[in-house]
Image (cartoon, rainbow, N blue to C red):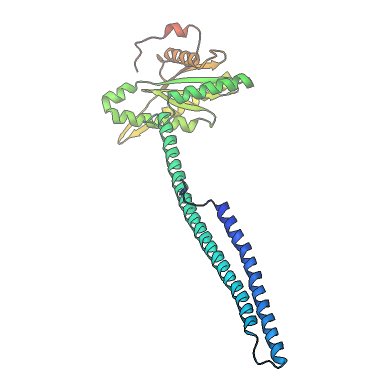
């Protein structure tokens, strides 16, 4: 907020008030001089009268009165100047305080608007990075976290595992029971995967009935296999939708870093290829092997 151009800056106003106060001290000294003069004149008159004179000489009286009157008028004038300066200074300080209050209010409103804007931006960013149907991270966010994980693995010598999950015969649920039932199954599977994952791991919906699961620094290949079995058991529990119950199993392909690839793109592609080798045996998992990339079929049931 811009302050009015007619407003005197606070430092100048305070300097003017300080000068007025100094002037008031000078006026006080003049008033005291007037009082001293009046006292002298009074003492002089008393002395003359004490000597037997009934009246003072007229010229002396006029001279004393004119001198004292001039001083009194000067004091009155100076007092008026001090009063005017103080009044103006106080008014300017009050104007500045009002403008400052308005500026603070405007700043508070701007900060509130900025907070709303940032919250909206964060919400929009979260929506852009998450799957709308399941609430899981989407592929964009997964790719970013995988890239960060690879950088960390290079620094610390970690193993990483990417699991590619495809739900077996999911298309039959959509075709036989409708997309609402299919969406319900996807949501439950997503919740189960999310509850299964550790804080440092990432689960995402890759699209359709496909999910990706990133494991950070598993202890060994056997540890990864044990986690894959646990994931299968977690997903395979019955899923209720209204009065209906569905049994769903995942086929899982697994690629390890750095054994099966040194980039996120290669790891996901190899885990995908391994998943297709698991597909003929619903509910199974396999680790990537070099021939898998050549054997990915296009006619397995979804």
Res 237 seen here: no
Q: Position of residue 96 (x, y in %)?
A: 50, 54
Left or right, 35 with reference to 119: right
Res 294 seen here: yes
Left or right, 224 with reference to 125: right
Q: Position of residue 65 (x, y in %)?
A: 61, 79
The residue lying at 38 percent from left, 25 percent from top is 248
The residue lying at 61 percent from left, 59 percent from top is 19
**Quarter of the figure with the C terminus:** top left
Left or right, 244 with reference to 293: left
Q: How many numbered marks appear? A: 0
Q: Position of residue 36 (x, y in %)?
A: 68, 77
- Which one is nearer the viewer's eye here, 123 or 98? 98
Left or right, 133 with reference to 1: left
- Which one is nearer the viewer's eye here, 9 or 170? 9
- Which one is nearer the viewer's eye here, 263 or 92? 92
Indicate the quadrant where residue 123 lies. Answer: top left
Indicate the quadrant where residue 110 lies. Answer: top left
Q: Position of residue 32 (x, y in %)?
A: 66, 74
Image vertical order of residue 154 relative to residue 242, above or below: above
């Amino acid at each position: 907020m811009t302050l009015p151009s007619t407003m005197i800056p606070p430092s100048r106003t305070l300097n003017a008030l300080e000068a007025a106060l100094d002037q008031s001290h000078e006026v006080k000294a003049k008033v005291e001089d007037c009082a001293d003069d009046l006292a002298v004149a009074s003492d002089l008159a008393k002395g003359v009268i004490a000597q037997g004179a009934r009246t003072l000489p007229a010229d002396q009286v006029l001279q004393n009165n004119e001198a004292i009157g001039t001083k009194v008028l000067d004091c009155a004038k100076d007092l008026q100047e001090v009063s005017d300066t103080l009044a103006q200074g106080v008014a300017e300080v009050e104007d500045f305080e009002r403008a400052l209050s308005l500026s603070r209010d405007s700043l508070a409103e701007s900060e509130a608007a900025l907070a709303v804007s940032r919250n909206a931006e964060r919400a929009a960013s979260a929506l852009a990075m998450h799957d709308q149907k399941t609430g899981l991270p989407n592929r964009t966010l997964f790719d970013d976290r995988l890239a960060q994980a690879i950088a960390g693995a290079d620094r610390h010598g970690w193993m990483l595992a990417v699991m590619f999950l495809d739900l077996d015969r999911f298309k039959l649920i959509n075709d036989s029971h409708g997309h609402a039932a299919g969406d319900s199954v996807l949501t439950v599977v997503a919740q189960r995967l999310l509850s299964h994952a550790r804080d440092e791991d990432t689960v995402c919906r890759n699209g359709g009935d496909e999910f990706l699961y990133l494991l950070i620094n598993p202890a060994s290949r056997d540890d990864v296999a044990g986690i894959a079995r646990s994931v299968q058991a977690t997903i395979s529990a019955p899923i209720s939708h209204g009065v209906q119950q569905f049994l769903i199993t995942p086929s899982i392909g697994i690629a390890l870093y750095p054994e099966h690839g040194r980039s996120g793109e290669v790891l996901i592609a190899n885990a995908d290829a391994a998943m297709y080798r698991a597909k003929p045996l619903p509910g199974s998992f396999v680790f990537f092997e070099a021939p898998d990339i050549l054997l990915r079929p296009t006619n397995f049931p979804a």
